Image: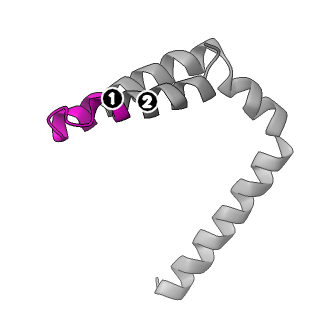
């Protein structure tokens, strides 16, 4: 498969994903605000924050927590 073919397939996939998101926007928003999304996002955000703190030796822990908190406010229901 050539790079052009791969690029065309990626563009097609992106367009289809955008169309799907537009068609199901209400259901997607509802799912992102669910208790299940809250639980999953908390686990992912905790893991990412922990990783960032380990990599930086905790040097940016306050910033990491701020970003984690901001993202947590936008996902789930808490």
Q: Residues at badges 1 and 2 in contact (C-beta under 8 Å)?
A: yes
Q: Is residue 55 visible?
A: yes
Is any atom of residue 75 visible in this view? Answer: no
Q: Is residue 1 above or below residue 22?
A: below
Q: Quadrant of the C terminus?
A: top right
Q: Mark 2 packing: few (<14 Cα in 10 Å), some, or many (20+)?
A: few
* Distance from the alpha carbon under mark 1 to that under mark 2: 6 Å
Front residue (pair 41, 60): 60
Residue 33: x and y in percent read: 68, 21
The relative height of residue 17 versus residue 70 in the rendered view (above or below) is: below
Q: What residue sits 62% from the left and 79% below the top?
A: 8
Residue at image position (70%, 55%) is 17
Q: Quadrant of residue 24?
A: top right
Q: Residue 60's quadrant in the figure?
A: top left
Residue 48 image position (x, y, % from top left): 34, 33
Q: Is residue 7 left or right of residue 31?
A: left
Magenta span covers which residues? 50-63
Report if residue 51 lies within the magenta region. yes
- Specify the color scheme: one colour
Residue appearing at x 48%, y 25% in the figure: 69
Q: What residue sits right under mark 1 in the picture?
A: 62
Prevalent SS, magenta region: helix
Give the structural element (helix, strand or loop) at label 1: helix
From the viewer's perspective, is 19 left or right of 6?
Answer: right
Q: Secondary structure at mark 2?
A: helix
Residue that numbered label 2 is attached to: 66
| Image coordinates for residue 59, horizontal then vertical, percent | 20, 36
Residue 29: assigned label: none
């Amino acid at each position: 498969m050539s790079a052009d073919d791969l690029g065309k397939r990626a563009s097609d996939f992106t367009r289809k994903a955008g169309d799907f998101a537009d068609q199901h926007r209400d259901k997607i928003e509802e799912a992102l605000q669910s208790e299940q999304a809250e639980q999953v996002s908390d686990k992912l955000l905790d893991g990412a924050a922990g990783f960032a703190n380990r990599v930086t030796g905790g040097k940016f822990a306050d910033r990491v927590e701020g970003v984690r908190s901001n993202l947590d406010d936008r996902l789930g229901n808490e």
